[in-house]
Image (cartoon, grey):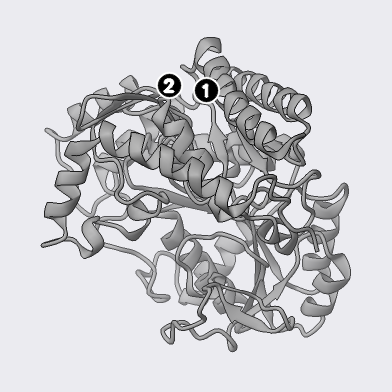
Amino acid sequence: MTRPQRMVTDRQLDILMNRETATYERRTPRSRAVFAQAQACLLNGVPMPWMGDWGTAYPLFVDHATENRIVDLDGHTYVDFCLGDTGAMFGHSPAPTAAAVTEQVHRGITTMMPSEDALWVGRDLGQRFGLPFWQVAMTATEANRYVIRICRTLTRRPKILVFNECYHGSVDEALVHLGPDGRLALRSEYDINPGIPKDALTRVVEFNDVPALEAALAHRDVACVLAEPVMTNCGMVLPAPGYHDRLREACTRHGTYLVIDETHTLSSGPGGYTAAHGLQPDFITLGKCIAGGIPVAVYGFTADIADGINASFGRKGLSDPMGIGGTLSGNALAVKAMRATLADVATPAAFERMIKGADRMADGLDASIATHRLPWSVTRCGARAELQLIPHAPTTGSQAKAAFDWGMIYYTHLYLANRGFIITPFHNMMLVPPMATDDDIDRLVGAWDACMGEIASLAGT
């Protein structure tokens, strides 16, 4: 299995990290002070656990964000290539979305009744993704949970199948992975969360491993395969040529529904990876950025599934027999924001600029890696790119995860932040929004190049 190739010693990396930490703490005294105050009322000083996981003694606290710029409490401006880990993929507070939200907030936020905007959204999603029927949830996690429940109801099967080191939000069944012995384990270093039933509900196989997929589905107890078309949680893992065709065929043959989670891979284009590569899923789930950052998600499905849902209810339109719904789901504010974002923000022209910018960024990073002779690589998915600390792109989640070098990841992130750039925590993912200029991109590449040069110099490459 591929392991990260550390180019510097632990002592050298500690020296670099201490230097950058000192710089960070000199620059951000207000964030440090607010973080200290927050210990009294917020668990570990943040309102959500991931906000504290930047590898720093305390996170940056944000004053405001606009387009692809973030300003912290100390007044420092950062060029943002994290974009809320996709939630703000089209930039912060896009003007059409902000205007629509401002209008709707005075016309009613939620009534638990449908709005005419929902009809427009359903039609647009159908045109983009090729599935005729759509429903609205609050988060992609929730959409995935609802789809899993529908699949279990229609197939009368208990299990789902996910890929090792996948990401589908906080769905219990997806928070497991293959341990060193090949058996299921919780996706935690300590395997200590008793709240997740790790054995009963999930089958896990490696991405791109067709024999393992076939063997798992042959049990005929899998209601659905829940898949990212490109794995994005453990770095980035691209599908092997022909893999999605084999996946679709195997699901059909074994009577298993295929669910494609496009929440991250919408970066591929207006209809996500599904439209860009001609996938034919039974369901699609999608969240995060489709309303410009306003919390909302959707799930779409085929006409046959719509008929099956109604048949399972006993009569068409029966409310909530599967426990699916939510008081705020489909609220007028979120749907208005979704309509504005889909109509005027997530446009083909915007994606063209984003993907062109991401290619410019990835080309620059590839050139710097080659110049400094580092055993690293860049993987691409539309407007998204991942710098991975291995010489060749991984083909499975296990390979990708084994290549993680947390010390190096935290150091490079802090190095970039101190020079005015934010990339995604947990790994080296970067997104390019439509308003990013060539100068924004080139300066990010320049900062990466300087960082690589220092590492290469210490390593003697």
Left or right? Give the position of 411 relative to 268.
left
Query: At label 1, which amino acid type do we have?
Result: Thr
Q: Nearer the viewer, residue 94 or 357?
A: 357
Q: Which residue is denoted by mark 1 in the rendering?
A: 347
Asked whether the viewer can see residue 55, the reply is yes
Q: Is residue 441 above or below residue 41?
A: above
> Which residue is depicted at the point 80% across and 64% down?
1
Q: Is residue 96 above or below residue 211?
A: above
Circle 2: is it few (<14), some (14-19), or many (20+) Cα within 10 Å? Answer: some
Front residue of 66/242: it is: 66
Horizontal relation, residue 278 to residue 458: left or right: right
For residue 91, the mark is none
The secondary structure type at the circle numbered 2 is: helix
Residue 359 pos. (x, y %): 68, 23
- Residue 445 location, quadrant: top right
Q: Quadrant of residue 139?
A: bottom left
For disc 2, the marked residue is 344
| Residue sitting at x 32%, y 34% | 337
Q: Is residue 351 visible?
A: no
Looking at the image, do the residues carrying marks 1 and 2 touch, with CB atoms under 8 Å apart? yes
State how far apart marks 1 and 2 are (Cα). Answer: 6 Å
Position of 338 with respect to 440 (left or right) is left
Question: How crowded is the residue under tag 1: few (<14 C-alpha within 10 Å), some, or many (20+)?
Answer: some
Query: Residue 91: x and y, percent?
Result: 41, 27
Query: Of 142 and 104, which appears nearest the observer?
Result: 142
Residue sitting at x 25%, y 62%: 44
Question: Mark 2: which amino acid?
Answer: Asp
Quarter of the picture containing the C terminus is top right
Looking at the image, residue 107 lies above or below residue 236: above
**Residue 104: percent from left, percent from top:** 20, 33
